[in-house]
Amino acid sequence: MSTVLTQATTSELDDFVNLSAILTGIAASMLKPFLDTHGTAQTYLDIAKQKGGAALTELMAVYDANRTQPPANIGTIILEQSGDTVAYMAKSIMLLWYLACWYDPQELAAYRADPTNGARFTVVSSDAYTQGWVWRVGQTHPMGYSTWSFGYWHQPPQPLSAFIGGGNSK
Amino acid sequence: MSEQNYDVVIVGAGVSGALIAKELGQAGKKVLILEAGRDGQGSYEDYLERFYMAQAKVPESPYTPPIVDADNNGFQSPSNPSNQAAGRPSTLTLSQNTWQDRNRSYLDQQGPLAFASTYERVGGGTMRHWLGTSLRFVPNDFRLKSEYGVAEDWPIDYDDLEPWYGKAEAAIGIAADVADQDYLGITFPDDYQYPMPAIPSSLVDQTVSAGVEKMPPVDGVQLTVTNTPAGRNSIPYQNRRVCAGNTNCIPICPIQAKYDPTVTLYEALQYPTVSIMYQTVASEVVVDANGQVSAIKYLQYDDPNGGVTGSGSVSATRYVLAAHAIETPRLLLMSTNGGRTPNGVANSSGHVGEHLMDHPIYLSWALAPTQLFGYRGPLSTAGIEDLRDGSFRSERAAFRIEIGNEGWNFPIGDPATTTLDYIVGANVSQTNAGSKSFFGDSLTSRLNFVLTRQFRLGFLVEQTPDDDCRVTLSPEWKDSLGLPRPRIEYNFSDYTKLGFVAAKQTATAIYNAMGAKEYTRQPTAADVGSDPTVFAITVDANGNPVPDGQAAPAGSTTDYFRFYGAGHTVGTYRMGTSPADSVVNPEQRSWDHPNLFLVGSGVFPTVATGNPTLTLAALALWAAETILSDLG
């Protein structure tokens, strides 16, 4: 008898993943694959709730109010038309996905004003580090976490779409 | 505790100590190794976890003791070396604000420039975080004085060392093809083969190679890209796996496909006559009235952030100091024997601690006109070796050029920096003019465009052995065992600086030939004197350096350079032909104390033009044979 896997999701998590896909440009099905052994989406939602609090609520409300819009419009509304609280919360979430690091929204606002002293952050976990999306956008693996074989570097990688899906913001 | 019956006591469980211990153990000799740091065995997962969680993934980040403490928010900052029993330098303490903060920097840096390289104090030593590059030196590296009238000759030559290079290549396990390596006078025995086939070249190497083939000669030399001999596995070797291209040789290979000295150390410890004491810091070399070393005193600790919990001394027939080129002179200088050796042990020449050198790196970076897919493969798989020797060496420093496979990770901390630029709306990477922010497909496409075109060249410049570069003892700053920490004075000669001028010109010429767009960020006059990793050099219209403080004649140009450490700490107890101007003889035996050997890169009279590991390993194997001959 085979085991049939069913995916338990919540609309909250789905919303978080779908919004994340619009912002990051990475397919929702890759951010939260059917067989999600890492549980990264839930981890990041939990961090965003814990760290972001009211800012996350505000961000998700903007998303909810505009969810029927084309993805590109949603991104523009969130990042350019809804105020700094929403925009920088969104950027913190994007950086979670890309770098597996938490940058506080206020830290990012200060960095944009003057990047001289860098932006402070914490690494979410070693498991999250290995799932950072920036590496895949670069058509590679995280430094220190290759799942490929000897000599792969002598040949070009697979096309970008193989790493991040077909794109979600069109 | 006092033990009297060892054949040999070795201080330091890095590559030199491990290789010597294994050779001696094989011959049935009774050997004790004193290692200041902790055992590395069983902690590999801890190392990886610490690396993954590090906010700054610097070479020292995986190892112990941790180089950072975290505050209540989880933000990491350099830990206080005054509280550490076996502290060590950190790349995190080279900034204007930290390099002379002795509650952050283990080294008591006096300047005028910062000594920018670091080392480990742990089982396996500094080679835990080495790159793997295993070049032989070129013959003229051993005769800089006689060929070019510069610095010093070595008391040995390439032919003396050649058989030992072969033995070291087998001991470490080097992947290379002889046909690629016989340049600039390097020779091999007939039918010699490296232990493993070469590591394949990266797409970055292939792209740079296609570019330099189109270049006009530099200093009369046609440049070529050469595959780099590497201490990493291309086939299974020493029961270790083949390289999977983790792009992480420094700080740590996650699968140990790269050799590190614990491989040899644990083999040595399989011999019943070889033993080791960890967390045991040698504190004094005891010399008797006849000029022989009679014991080594040590201090022990339980808590890496605690004080002394034990002490003792050990005696042997022969003694080997293998604690690398800063801790070895530190130990010798600490060894005053109650005032009987006020200048330290093995120091009748006064040269212990003198002539500290590195390969200061001129780092440059660019975007290629086509995708070359960095961040893939070992950190480096090829270089340009043609400018390691030539008549220009009478005028300016030589260099080798290391081609990086890790994008702009070394220069600007990418991919994080460019990601922040595009998401937050900044332009630290200089690729986001207008500091715009992006999302969705425009974010992925812009990031992909930049990340897959990034590459960098590192020029390892041959620093001269100079009188104003030295290790002494800090009169004020101590570790938690109460031992004085190393005090460093460091600077560059004009000869060394002129190597940077040539490196900069060569980098730009290579980028132009490739059609690449250069992004190297040069410092300015304002950085000189404030940033301890920045210097200036002014040359007149004829290319001659204008001395500091002298008015620059018309037609002069001034360049400002930032340098980086290569981790190639060299030269503080050099070998030579005379006790008056060297610390050890060509056998690496102290001129002053015939039963004391000093090994490691501290014996190098010059830093030469190759990464030092293979040469110091060859010399260690040679010293082991001499010690065995002594013991009979």
Image (cartoon, rainbow, N blue to C red):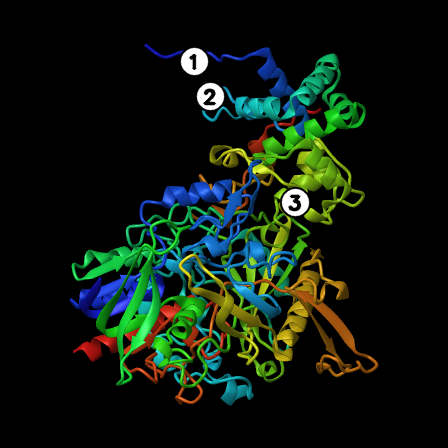
* Residue B304 horizontal side relative to residue B298, left or right: right
Please rate how many residues cluster around mark 1, counting C-alpha atoms within 10 Å: few if below 14, some from 14 to 19, many from 20.
few
Chain of the residue that carries numbered disc 2 in the rendered image:
A
Establish if B461 lies above or below B57: below
Which residue in the structure is indicated by mark 1? Answer: A5
Which residue in the structure is indicated by mark 3? Answer: B417
The kind of residue on which mark 3 rests is Thr
Q: Report whether mark 3 lies on the same chain as mark 2.
A: no
Q: Residue at x 64, y 77 (%)?
A: B219
Q: Residue at x 74, y 45 (%)?
A: B427
Chain of the residue that carries numbered disc 1 in the rendered image:
A
Callout 3 secondary element: helix
Please rate how many residues cluster around mark 3, counting C-alpha atoms within 10 Å: few if below 14, some from 14 to 19, many from 20.
some
Residue A35: mark in rendering: 2
Disc nearest the viewer among 1 and 3: 3
The kind of residue on which mark 2 rests is Leu
Callout 2 secondary element: loop
Name the quadrant of the C terminus of chain A: top right
